[in-house]
Image: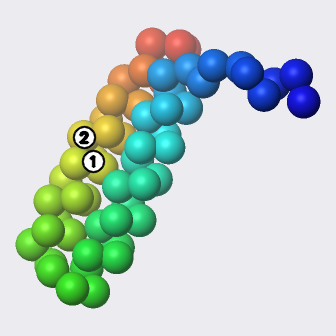
Amino acid sequence: MFGLFKKKNESEVLNEKYQKLLKEAFDLSKVNRTASDQKYGEADKVLKEIEKLEGKKD
């Protein structure tokens, strides 16, 4: 309950964005393959940012 107002760190925010982009890309893959590929590309960029942040932590 006390974690209700806890701010998310940058890695958590990027991870949520990554998951959202993957879901959108999957949904688009059924309708428009080109748009789906673009979403996967965006998701890949976000994943690289996440990996870069996690690399800094270690």
Which of 28 and 58 lies nearest the eye of the viewer?
Answer: 28
Q: Residue furthest bottom?
A: 30
Q: Quadrant of the N terminus?
A: top right
Tell me which residue sits at (41%, 65%) in the image. 23
Q: Is residue 55 left or right of residue 12?
A: left
The image shows residue 25 at horizontal and vertical percentages of 30, 67
Q: Amino acid at mark 2?
A: Lys
Query: Is 12 above or below relative to 32?
Result: above
Q: Are the two marked residues, 2 and 1, in contact with CB atoms closer than 8 angstroms?
A: yes
Q: Residue at x 35, y 55 (%)?
A: 21
Q: Quadrant of residue 30?
A: bottom left
Taking 6 as reference, is 55 left or right?
A: left
Q: Which residue is mark 2?
A: 45
Quadrant for the C terminus in the image: top right
Residue beneath label 1, please?
44
Q: How many marks?
A: 2
Lateral position of residue 52 relative to residue 6, left or right: left
